[in-house]
Amino acid sequence: MSSPIPAHDLAAQGIKVDAALHWNLPTAPLVEEAVRRGEGVLAKDGPLVVKTGKHTGRSANDKFIVRDAETENTVWWGKTNKGMTPEHFAALKEDFLKHLGTKETLFVQDLYGGSQPEYRVNVRVINELAWHNLFIKTLLVRPGAEELPGFVPEYTIIDLPSFRADPERHGVRSETVIAVNLTEKLILIGGTAYAGEMKKSVFGILNYKLPVEGVMPMHCSANIGPKGDTAVFFGLSGTGKTTLSADASRTLIGDDEHGWSDTAVFNFEGGCYAKMIRLSPEAEPEIYATTKRFGTVLENVVIDMDTREIDLDDDSLAENSRGSYPIDFIPNASEKNLGPVPKNIIFLTADAYGVLPPIAKLTPDQAMYHFLSGYTARVAGTEIGVTEPTATFSTCFGAPFMPRHPSVYGNLLKERIAKGGVDCWLVNTGWTGGSYGVGHRMPIKATRALLNAALDGSLNAATFEIDPNFGFQVPQAVPGVDSAILNPRETWADKAAYDATARKLVDQFIENFSQFADHVDEGVRQAAPKAA
């Protein structure tokens, strides 16, 4: 059933196990193994449905990077990037390998992180769960069969949901741990069955590795228009990256993680990981169709065990229900998983305050300011303990995944914007007509119409006015869009309340950006909002 064992096997890595090893299984055998082992069930239309237990999102507070000579001066240490001593990692690794040795069966995949050959990284993933092995095989880039026998891993991930960390012995916070050792090129994930930890660990590797090679790593989706024009969509989980990039009129490069080199925008992954809750066949037909495909894995989606019908509207297991599927399940996905350098950059934000317009045009300095700010609302379900949207700033629209100082990524972005003459837009997919709880979510049809106008170039011909608080350009009229929603202040019944809320948000932007002020030039500092 397995592929041939590569010459550089686990023993060559110093990993000794007595388990039956399943090497590089394809999709169907992995699904069969998952069902046979009781890890999941098949839904009526073919997808594998699994539960992740108490961890239905990333355990951000349980992630650590080993602090040693390699990382001491290269990692941006703080609340997001928390250090672990080499001694604690050594104890954790010892216990991980002991636990690995107790397993009767293990699943191994050899995969690439990155689609542009000169910038990809070889990753070996060792799993105790068949469905986790299927997940990571789906999400990363799959080597050709001829490449597997000679595959040599640069990084290795050992993923053991049944492992329990010891806070005292391992220097961690709880029984859950994600420990990243950039010197040993080893990542240990234990105490959580949320599969997304694996893919984000590979993202973290590339975010550390690629800037040194002059490549801009991005937490974004990307697609290509009919004229070969690439668009990049930055945004945190729940802001619309996956939904808005899956557009039938454009070719999808990818939905979450990319690199921007001198010659291309390339997907780090070979699959998509989309939110499933309340997925609509009308608003998101391409993604909805994947829920009826064999090879899709649905996490924490409720299923009727008699009829095997799934219910995407039921959030009783998790608000953050997810589906993973190969990128070619999207009909218009790029065969090469990459495209030309971008013509447009979109910063997506789900503004919980209802202050920002549905679309605004940014100068290059404003673009860097908003990239470093990374304002959005933390949307329910993506992280444990978050149950409703709250305003937050996540630098580079992906702080949890960025090991280096944000200015490293910000300066790379500004250089590439200037070099390519890229148009930059801020798009609010959040609230209009009031703050969260009073206003309502921005209509997706309006968002798509505004995006289409930006991407086809017609929006550049619009009449703009300067937003009095943020200084960016806001269109006054766009064909096919109700002009009433373009000016956020006019959507509020209580104008005084809007003004007060806008002042509050401006103050939060200014306070947050103070940490970056010494790392940017005067033009970027002057791009800060100013209360009207």
Image (cartoon, grey):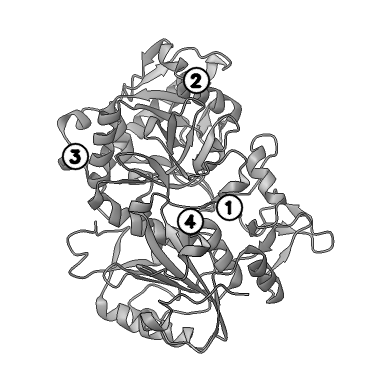
**Residue 151 location (% of width, % of height):** 42, 68
**Residue 343 location (% of width, % of height):** 38, 28
Q: Secondary structure at mark 4?
A: loop
Q: Secondary structure at mark 1?
A: strand
Residue at the spot of label 2: 453
Separation of marks 3 and 2 at Cα, in angstroms: 33 Å
Q: Residue at x 59, y 55 (%)?
A: 324
Residue 333 sits in quarter: top right
Between residue 193 and residue 148, name the one nearer to us: 148
**What mark, if any, has residue 326 been given in the picture?**
1
**What mark, if any, has residue 141 been given in the picture?**
4
Residue 170 sits in quarter: bottom left
In the rendered image, the quadrant that contains the N terminus is bottom right
4 or 3: tag closer to the N-terminus? 4
Residue type at mark 1: give it. Answer: Pro
Between residue 261 and residue 70, name the one nearer to us: 261
Picture layout, residue 512 above or below residue 80: above
Q: Residue at x 53, y 14 (%)?
A: 483
In the rendered image, the quadrant that contains the C terminus is top left
